Amino acid sequence: MRRFFKRILTKPVTWLANKFSSRPNLQRVLTALTKLYKDSLENPGKKGLVIDTNVAGARFIIFSDQHKGAKNGSDDFAFAEPTYMSALEYYLQQHYHFISLGDEEELWENLVGPVKEKNKASIELQKKFLLQSRYTKVFGNHDIFWNNDPFAGLQLKSMYDQDVKIYEAVLLRIAMGEKVLPIFLTHGHQGDGQSDANPFSAWFVGRVWAPLQCYLGINLNVPSANDHLKTAHNLFMYQWSKDDNHPVLITGHTHQPVFASFTQLERLYRKYETATTANDELTIAALKKQIRFQQNEYDYVLGNYAKMKPYYFNSGCCCFSDGDITGIEIVDGFIRLIKWQTKTGLAERVLLEEMELGELLQAV
């Protein structure tokens, strides 16, 4: 039956996908982010939560894109769940504030009930953060249900045994002496023609359009599944955050970690150029090996990447196929890109990149 529907519906569905594509549009993205940021400033606590802290008290872990499913064959989170649980246990014990930056639940492919039933362990662990007022939930495009369904609040209360406020953004304002470092966090789908529109459009995409594409086996043409769209997304996010009136920006959405505006591949290229200038043969050989490895996953770089400033960060995702997860820490006066991996049965935290918040403040 599926083959029959795929044969007769693929062409019209593909035409609709091209017509109402989620391919990012620069002006639409810039307008949507600016509107959201302005609303967060003017109406704190409505769409955007504002958290005022200082450099000594800032203690945040930012994870996104868990895509918790129903533990079936298409559940990407299942591989990473043990590592994710170990990481959350660590951050709970270390008294971090956990910001879940969207697409925590995969509700394009699943109903809430099965997701809730099959992810009780991680929900119970996150509940501990919530009980200590250290959990903030932001919605993304794959769990936009939390923002537009009239029963979303009841569903969340049944999951966490208390009301859970859903936000579209978080604005961190970190006091550093007489200055303040603002950091704006949102999922990153803003300006997406399919996901960031009026409530009916968002409902239609989440409940009809996306499941139909999934059923037919058609690529959903979103940044997480398309290298060209990842590059465009990174550039548009950077373009917004480098404006003098805008803060540092942290998003998710693409599943690709970005630190200080550089993807991991771009950072390797920059190190390679430095090593070449210094004629450091050992470092050159090591970097060539790392570059080849990264190119297997992602082989696109922005033409002007070497001149980019540290305005934009991306938390990556918690559903890599090898079970690894990535996230961003803000703690001890640093912003850090970290990876958690499980190689020998025990999860370990790996520091990938770090920058002092003072250096970031000075750079922006």
Image (cartoon, grey):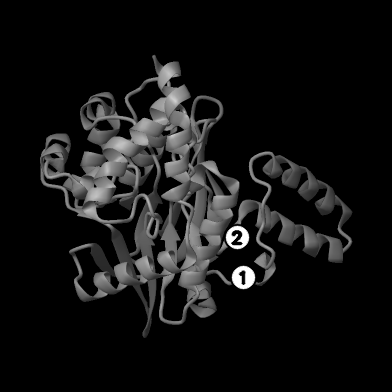
Pointer 2: residues within 10 angstroms few (<14), some, or many (20+)?
many
- Say what secondary structure mark 2 lies in: strand
Camera-side residue: 40 or 134? 40
Which residue is rendered at x = 22% and y = 49% of the image? 200
Q: Earlier in the sequence, mark 2 or mark 1?
A: 2
Residue 82 seen in the figure: no
Which residue is rendered at x = 34% and y = 38% of the image? 209
What's the amino acid at mark 2? Answer: Phe
Task: Say which residue label 2 marks.
Answer: 262
Rounded to the nearest angstrom, the CA distance separating label 2 from label 1 is 8 Å
In the picture shown, does residue 28 fall above or below 135? below
Q: Is residue 121 left or right of residue 311?
A: left
In the rendered image, which quarter is residue 149 located in?
Answer: top left
- Say what secondary structure mark 1 lies in: loop
Tell me where residue 73 appears, x and y as whole percent: 42, 20
Camera-side residue: 187 or 134? 187
Tell me where residue 293 appears, x and y as whole percent: 71, 40
Task: Say which residue label 1 marks.
Answer: 308
Asked if disc 2 and disc 1 are in contact, CB closer than 8 Å, the reply is: yes
